Image (cartoon, grey):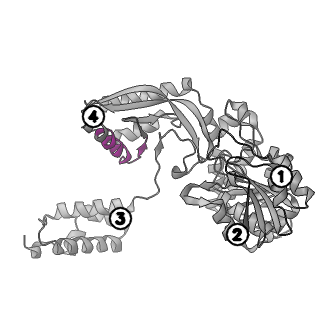
């Protein structure tokens, strides 16, 4: 086709579709989009370039709408992993969302002491709550637990040795490793024991004039079984204090309350770890705590104050939105009797099969009405996991919608994968997991089935 037949920029801008687009996106942005689209058509000498105004305008409007869609979008988590790192971990409770919104909408006293009328300390908004919940003398907040460990190591043991069991040299997601964080903190790693067995004398024998810290790392994202031994926090703390050294614990996914109260597996609490003798404990805010992404350090006041004065603290600090949300989540923990209703993370973890099954059946019925053979939909029992490195070998009984294809062996996996792609392509994507030639949509995290049914309104094709 003759590219000279393409309409002018002005003619396209005066179409109804692009007048609507200008109201939404502004004239300058739409004009740039029109020029770019026409330039691509002129450059594509082999393509069939449409010349109809309405067709061209509609294509440009669609491109503008696609570009305006946020890359960070709501998804429906049916993966079976409650604290899914790739999906933002903990879902905030409503109280935290309201506090966050209020802080975002106006100036607030994030670093201003209203009583004294002068600059204040931003950690104050969470510190008293952390102290009340953990028994710590002091606390501070940084942007994640890795930052908390980095700040602690750099403050307490820079240019000195840190004694750690070989069995606790943890790697977390994205290949971030304790030895790497230690190196960036300016510390020297002193490994003791072996991968599967470490004894008290290993710690004692490692202490020299160069030792700055004895560190225990809670292996929350893996478990070594079999012929093993490790030294508990109390004994390591006793060894450290006998040699006038600091003892710290990286608790990782740290919880403030004993999860067994809700029928969940035991995970060491921050209070219990401090009571056992740890001088400092670091833990995450967006895992079992159920709050926003942050890292919290709790422990001895003199050590926390040294960390607060470290220039790295400013580089790692959190903003007013995080502090507002965190404070509300901590307040919810002050009322443990109602926590399983008020904290979404705990509520989802504590759900029973009997509570999940009706949700799964409604979702299964909706999918069965939309899928043609060779797809078969049913409801099955399955296992969920806590996620984000918390209690890695413990699973939770759950219920899922299972979708399989009755096509040939070669084709069935393609059918299941294709269906998962289609569900991920919805306006509100639905994410499951492929397991054993089937797509499983684990309903543990689906508290409002109408949310998923609304997302499926855009899924009207009966395929294959």
Front disc: 1 or 2? 1
Secondary structure at numbered mark 3 = helix
Secondary structure at numbered mark 1 = helix
Magenta stretch: includes residue 420: yes
Residue under label 2: 185
Q: Is residue 79 above or below residue 379?
A: below
- Who is closer to the viewer here, 134 or 389? 389
Taking the view exactly as shown, the residue that stands out farthest to the top is 354
Front disc: 1 or 3? 1
Of callouts 4 and 1, which one flags the residue occurring earlier in the amino acid sequence?
A: 1
Secondary structure at numbered mark 2 = loop
User: Could you give the CA–CA distance between mark 2 and mark 4, rounded to whole angstroms?
Assistant: 53 Å
Residue 431 falls left or right of residue 245? left
Is residue 19 visible in the rendered image? The answer is: yes
Residue 184 falls left or right of residue 248? left
Residue under label 1: 201
Residue under label 4: 409
- Who is closer to the viewer here, 391 or 305? 391
Total numbered circles: 4
Front disc: 4 or 1? 1
Of callouts 2 and 3, which one flags the residue occurring earlier in the amino acid sequence?
A: 3
Secondary structure at numbered mark 4 = helix
Magenta-drawn segment: 415-432
What is the x, y in percent for residue 224? 64, 43
Of callouts 1 and 3, which one flags the residue occurring earlier in the amino acid sequence?
A: 3
Is residue 274 visible in the rendered image? The answer is: no
Quadrant including the C terminus: top left
Label 2: how many Cα within 10 Å (few below 14, some 14–19, many 20+): many
Of callouts 2 and 4, which one flags the residue occurring earlier in the amino acid sequence?
A: 2
Taking the view exactly as shown, the residue that stands out farthest to the left is 1
């Amino acid at each position: 086709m003759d590219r000279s037949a393409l309409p002018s920029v002005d003619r396209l801008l005066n179409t109804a579709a692009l007048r609507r687009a200008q109201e939404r996106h502004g004239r300058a942005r739409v004009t740039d989009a029109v020029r770019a689209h026409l330039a691509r058509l002129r450059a594509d000498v082999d393509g069939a370039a449409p010349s109809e105004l309405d067709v061209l305008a509609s294509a440009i409007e669609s491109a503008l709408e696609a570009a305006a869609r946020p890359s960070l979008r709501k998804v429906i988590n049916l993966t079976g992993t409650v604290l899914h790192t790739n999906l933002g971990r903990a879902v905030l409770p409503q109280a935290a969302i309201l506090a966050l919104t209020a802080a975002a909408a106006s100036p607030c006293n994030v670093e201003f002491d209203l009583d004294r009328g002068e600059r204040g300390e931003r950690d104050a908004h969470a510190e008293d709550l952390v102290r009340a919940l953990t028994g710590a003398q002091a606390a501070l907040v940084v942007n994640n637990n890795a930052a908390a460990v980095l700040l602690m190591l750099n403050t307490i043991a820079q240019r000195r040795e840190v004694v750690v069991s070989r069995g606790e040299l943890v790697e977390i997601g994205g290949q971030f490793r304790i030895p790497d964080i230690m190196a960036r903190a300016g510390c020297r790693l002193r490994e003791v024991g072996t991968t599967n067995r470490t004894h008290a004398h290993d710690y004692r024998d490692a202490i020299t004039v160069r030792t700055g810290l004895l560190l225990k790392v809670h292996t929350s994202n893996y478990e070594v079984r079999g012929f093993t031994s490790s030294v508990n926090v109390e004994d390591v703390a006793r060894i450290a204090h006998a040699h006038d050294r600091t003892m710290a614990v990286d608790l990782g996914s740290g919880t403030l309350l004993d999860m067994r109260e809700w029928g969940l597996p035991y995970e060491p609490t921050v209070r219990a770890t401090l009571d056992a003798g740890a001088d400092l404990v670091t833990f995450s805010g967006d895992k079992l705590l159920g709050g926003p992404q942050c890292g919290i350090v709790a422990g001895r006041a003199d050590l926390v104050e040294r960390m607060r004065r470290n220039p790295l603290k400013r580089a790692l600090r959190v903003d007013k939105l995080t502090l507002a949300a965190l404070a509300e989540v901590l307040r919810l923990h002050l009322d443990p009797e109602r926590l399983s209703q008020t904290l979404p993370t705990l509520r989802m973890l504590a759900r029973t099969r009997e509570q999940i099954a009706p949700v799964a059946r409604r979702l299964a019925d909706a999918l069965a009405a939309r899928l043609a053979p060779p797809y078969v939909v049913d409801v099955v029992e399955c296992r969920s996991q806590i996620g984000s490195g918390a209690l890695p070998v413990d699973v939770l009984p759950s219920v899922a919608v299972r979708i399989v294809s009755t096509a040939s062996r070669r084709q069935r996996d393609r059918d299941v994968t294709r269906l998962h792609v289609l569900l991920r392509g919805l306006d509100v994507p639905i994410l499951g997991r492929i397991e054993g030639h089937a797509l499983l949509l684990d309903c543990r995290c689906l508290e409002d089935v109408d949310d998923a049914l609304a997302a499926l309104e855009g899924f009207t094709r009966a395929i294959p």
